[in-house]
Image (spheres, helix red, strand yellow):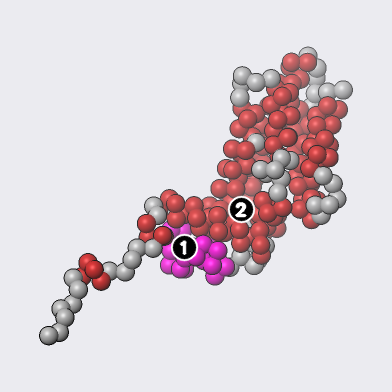
Amino acid sequence: MAKKDAPAKERRPARTRHNRESPDVRRKSLIQATMRSIAKYGFAGTTIGRICAEAQVSRGLINHHFGTKEELIRQSYMELCNEWSFQTRDMLLDDHRDPEEKLRAMIRVSFGPTVFRTDHLGIWVGFWSIIGKSPMLKKLNRELYKQDRDTYQRAFDEIAAKRGVKVDTRRAAIALGALMDGLWLEWCLDPKGFTPEEAEAACLDLVTRTFE
């Protein structure tokens, strides 16, 4: 006697890890995969296929959550900027800490092991390489730069007020941001060129000399 077909519910394919995840978790996973791909292959080498391979998903999932590769790239850069703010800039907004200690702490974190890593800096360099050609990323980068510059300037303003001295705090903020970016780029190109401790000391020296 022939066996009856199994009930439909028993014939359903097993749910995969990606099926069980919430939409927010899946989007986060795709964004992180995009960043890993940029760190490995650069911006030009970050194709949809490589992102899918990193995330172990199909192209359809990217289309479902982001619509286009450009939108995925945009949200990935936003995530990177938000992580930078969380790790560094936000500590400068704490009104209960000494302004000099806040700025020095931000510099230490910027060259500490959480942020100052070749893979992490590789992601930044990958995005920087295309910002000039992408109006979308250029707009986001301009906003990030302004936020950083304004936050650094506020810190310099607070230190100047505490010491009772006059300082061109806007120029100091521009100089600090440029020095930090330059050190990041140079270290990414050649990690043996200088140590993280030397990079941190160079930025701390700039702060000290600003008020001499």
Relative to 179, does residue 121 appear above or below in the rendering?
Answer: below
Q: Main secondary structure of the magenta part?
A: helix
Q: Is residue 54 magenta?
A: yes
What amino acid type is highlighted by mark number 1?
A: Ile
Helix, strand or loop for disc 2: helix
**Placement of the C terminus among the 4 image quadrants:** top right
**Direction front: furthest residue:** 1
- Where is residue 121 drawn, in percent x and y? 70, 51
The percent position of residue 43, horizontal first and vertical second, equals 65, 62
Q: Position of residue 191 (x, y in %)?
A: 80, 52
The residue singled out by tag 2 in the image is: 137
What residue sits 61% from the left and 53% below the top?
A: 137
Compared across the picture, whether 36 is left or right of 157 comes to left
Q: Is residue 105 above or below residue 25?
A: above
Q: Is residue 12 left or right of residue 117?
A: left
Q: Is residue 186 visible?
A: yes
Query: Which residues make up the magenta segment?
Result: 48-69
Q: Is residue 1 above or below residue 82?
A: below
**Residue 59 or residue 128, whichever sits in front:** 59
Res 183 → quadrant: top right
Determine which of the numbered discs, if any, sits on residue 62 in the image. 1
Residue 74 appears in the rendering: no
